[in-house]
Amino acid sequence: MSADYESIIRAAVDRLPPDDIQGRGKLYARARAFITETAALASSERPGAVDRIEAAIARVEAAVAPPPSAIAAARHGGSRRWIGWASAALVACAVAIPVIVFSMRDTGLHLEGPVMSDFDGPDSGFVQVNGKPFTQSDGERYEFRRVDERSVLFVEGRAQLISADRYRVDTSKLYRMEIGLRSVATDKSHASRVNAGVATYDADGKLQTDAPGTHRYFAMQEALSTLDDWQQRSGFITGEGNRTHTTFRPGTRYVRPIVLVNYGSAEQAVEIDYVRFDECSTPTDCRAVQPETEGAAKTK
């Protein structure tokens, strides 16, 4: 793959049927895998290449994805469709990185606590995996489990989880994201690398890609050094700027919570207990943020 990642990816996307979200996910997955696994790149060159491929993917997706209003119009009565992941080929020499899409629970009630994805089964987390309905025995890489009286999602190997809904935000306000998870790799040398934060979009629904980072990973950027112990990580984001991950990009109007897991090695594995995203009046007082419904921003 040459350095002109965007042209190559866009050419491949243009060959897909219109609105083929899963097809695009497959192409993006193989593009990421090519960069992270190809022997042609020295280890010192990979971070920059990863940033470039992510920026190229973001620009292509921004050009072809519908704005939030179009997504909202496709929903019926404010209900949420929870959609899954896909992975397939962009280049023959790469191994797929799946993309998992999750959604914050929307019961229509005025909840006092945060709205969250708690991965308690296919009916409340995913409707499909790899293009077919999810079952407990569907492969070895993904599995809903009941562990320590928790409903969790087991993920083995590199994966990207992203909210199915875009959320309207006011960048002058304070927001919090929290994730509960643990590394369940076979040994400490394969402890899971996890990034958690938000993808940001402007008023037209276009994905923003200004540095730092492909996305704003304000909640977590670390390799879990402890195996088997449950961990909670959280962080806050507010304001606008391009110096740190703890500020929105200038002009941000929408976000999608996003979590990248096991990006250090295909041998890594995690169990994810929950992911949640809150609007806060103070760091200790947060309330749930509700997805866009038919173009109208709401908070619970």
Image (tube, rainbow, N blue to C red):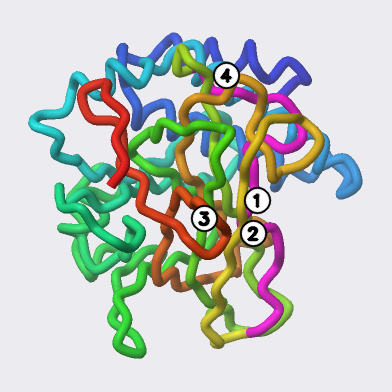
User: Residue at (19%, 19%) from the top-left corner?
Assistant: 73
User: Residue at (64%, 41%) from the top-left corner?
Assistant: 216
Q: Disc 4 and disc 3: Cα gap in Å?
A: 31 Å
Closest to the camera, between mark 4 and mark 2, is 2
In x, y percent, where is residue 104?
Answer: 31, 50
Residue holding disc 2: 220
Q: Amino acid at mark 4?
A: Ile
Residue holding disc 1: 218
Closest to the camera, between mark 4 and mark 3, is 3
From the viewer's side, name the closer residue of 57 and 37: 57
How crowded pointer 4 is (Cα within 10 Å; few <14, some 14-19, many 20+) is rated as many
Residue occupying the far left of the picture: 77
Residue 264 part of the magenta segment? no
Q: Decide: marks 4, 3 in contact (CB < 8 A)?
A: no
Residue 221 part of the magenta segment? yes
Res 123 → quadrant: bottom left
From the viewer's side, name the closer residue of 208 and 241: 241
